[in-house]
Amino acid sequence: MGFGFGLYLGVPIAAAALLLAASGTAVLTKGWMLPRQRKHVVRTKLFGWAQLLLAAALGVQLVGLTVVGPPYQGLFVTPGVIGLLFALVLVTRAQRPARPGRRG
């Protein structure tokens, strides 16, 4: 049984999930984040939880793409997508609101 594109997609997804989990853990435990993120994020704990949720959602999707067969992939991919969307909401709530009348 071959993996098809699952293995080619799985390695970058796993790397991204591990990096997000490490970054979320650093934010939650030490309050550390990249300087580029620091100027936009005002709620660091919420941002850390959002990164951990992103990592978990990517992990669930990774299982659905690489381990589970086609009839049951939807049981893993759908909750992964819902987790990604919820994490997106958390990331936007953790950021500073835009100033009125300013773009970009």
Image (spheres, grey):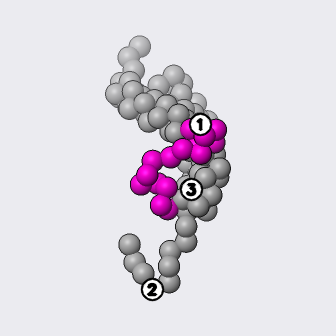
Q: Is mark 1 on a helix, strand or loop?
A: helix
Q: Where is residue 61 in the image (x, y as percent from the top left)?
A: 52, 35
Q: Which residue is drawn at 38% across and 17% down?
A: 2
Q: Name the residue under label 3.
A: 91
Q: Pick whichever of labels 3 and 1 is earlier in the sequence.
A: 1
> Relative to 51, is 71 above or below?
above
Q: Residue at x 52, y 39 (%)?
A: 23
Q: Nearer the viewer, residue 98 or 60?
A: 98
Would you say the residues marked 2 and 1 are in contact, meaning their CB atoms lie under 8 Å apart?
A: no
Q: Which label sits on residue 101?
A: 2
Q: Is mark 3 on a helix, strand or loop?
A: helix
Q: Can residue 55 be seen in this view?
A: no
Q: Nearer the viewer, mark 3 or mark 1?
A: 1
Q: Nearer the viewer, residue 45 or 86?
A: 45
Q: Main secondary structure of the magenta part?
A: helix
Q: What is the magenta range?
A: 25-40
Residue type indicated by callout 3: Val
Q: Where is residue 69 in the image (x, y as percent from the top left)?
A: 52, 25
Q: Is residue 82 left or right of residue 67?
A: right
Q: Mark 1 points at which residue?
A: 25
